[in-house]
Image (tube, helix red, strand yellow):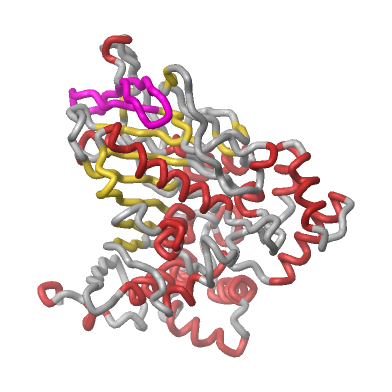
Amino acid sequence: MSGEWVHPGQTLFWAVWVLAAATEGPAADAPVRNTRLEWSRGKQATVLGNDMPVNVFLGIPYAAPPVGLLRFAKPEPALLWNDFQNATSYPKLCLQNSEWLFSDQHILKVHYPKLSVSEDCLYLNIYAPPHADTGSKLPVMVWLPGGDFETGSASIFHGSALASYEDVLVVTIQYWLGIFGFFNTRDKHALGNWAFMDQVAALTWVQENIEFFDGDPHCVTIFGESAGAISVSSLILSPMAKGLFHRAIMESGVAIIPYLKAPDYERNDDSQMVADICACNVSDSVALLQFLRAKSSKELLSINQKTKSFTRVVDGFFSPHDPLDLLAQKSFKPVPSVIGVNNHECGFPLPVEFPEILGGSNKSLALQLIHSTLHIPVQYLYLVANEYFYNKHSLIDTRNRFLDLLGDVFFVIPGLVTAQYHRGPCRKVLPLHIFWGLAPTFLPLRKCLPKDLN
């Protein structure tokens, strides 16, 4: 096998990729698989430190192209191919603002594959260990990318290293983003949650076809970070995804994160703005939908940059009730899960959202930002100061504690609440806390640590 080393970039919010060689071998070495819909010809990649090649299949369609009448609609099954599908190139990105993507790369100092965008983007990538053959029944891990439901793709995470070293079959998927993934008219004409329905379609494809790639459809773990983790958590709660996976890993995100629920005034403003652009009555859902389906993708991207509120909604199907209500009512089937958070969870948006404290902050400025960001009444700010800023004198320490507070609000507390609701008579939650520095006083650490860690 011949070729040259390719150094992939980093995944959003992840520290570093393991370097891999995405080298395409001769035709005789190219892996071929027959699914229910098509024959797929892939290529092989070599991971540093492991001489055995990984079988790679890129850009496999899991649903029909979501164009025309399928824009803002439930995804349809992938179309039948009459010939070999050449699964050796990364799929195009789902439509997203390229400036935001470049901003992510600049802030995180990462380099993603340079790919164009398209509305026809419902594809997945598969990475299989070299020894996988018919009947292997390897565990399957399905990666859902993050990016605030505005950016991201299946191809920013290279699954070769995980497949090679951990002996699992890795699937990375991509789904509609922004207004394409969440536009809704609050009625039957456009329910919304299209991004989540894409994910259900991808997991359905995995159930129906992954055995042809030597994976076990009865041993599927879904995992993701940020928006991907929120998606994982949402899929656990959804009746539409029941039975499509068996384990879950949520890295920095769960379904009850506060910012996902847009206030009514924002939703009303955005709906009216779209109606004004369409020259339609905001209550005429059919006319709105027809107009938006006739718009070019470029025009829709322009609208997307002006809206704030098109996010997850209670649609009666994917999300029958508010996620917190679903958790409290235990109206879901829990699966063995891992829920994780990181130090300084909200450090990523710091350069954009809070540039004034990038180099540090005094307590007064930090409390002003807390008041304006979290809408904590002024009379209660002293409680925040006592908890987070007591005996903190340096500007850097104060800034870091500000980030800790935001992390607690948006990630830590929702994660703990979600884990608590996952508990049951036959289900145990084993919390493991690893802290560098001080932990919030409201966490009963000594009570919940395993005995051998107390």
**Quadrant of the image containing the N terminus:** top left
**Which range of residues does the magenta coloring cover?**
32-57
Q: Which residue reaches farthest right?
A: 279
| Residue 162, x across and y down, in percent | 27, 39
- Residue 110 appearing in the image: no
| Residue 199, x across and y down, in percent | 47, 48
- Residue at point 56%, 44% (across, down): 75
Viewer-closest of 32 and 452: 32
Number of numbered labels in the structure image: 0
The reply to whether the magenta stretch includes residue 175 is no
In the visual, does 83 lie left or right of 178? left
The overriding secondary structure of the stretch rendered in magenta is: strand
**Quadrant of the image containing the C terminus:** bottom left
- Residue at point 64%, 67% (across, down): 262
- Residue 200 appearing in the image: yes
- Residue at point 69%, 41% (across, down): 69
Above or below for 412 versus 132? below
- Residue at point 30%, 35% (across, down): 18
Viewer-closest of 320 and 162: 320
The reply to whether the magenta stretch includes residue 34 is yes
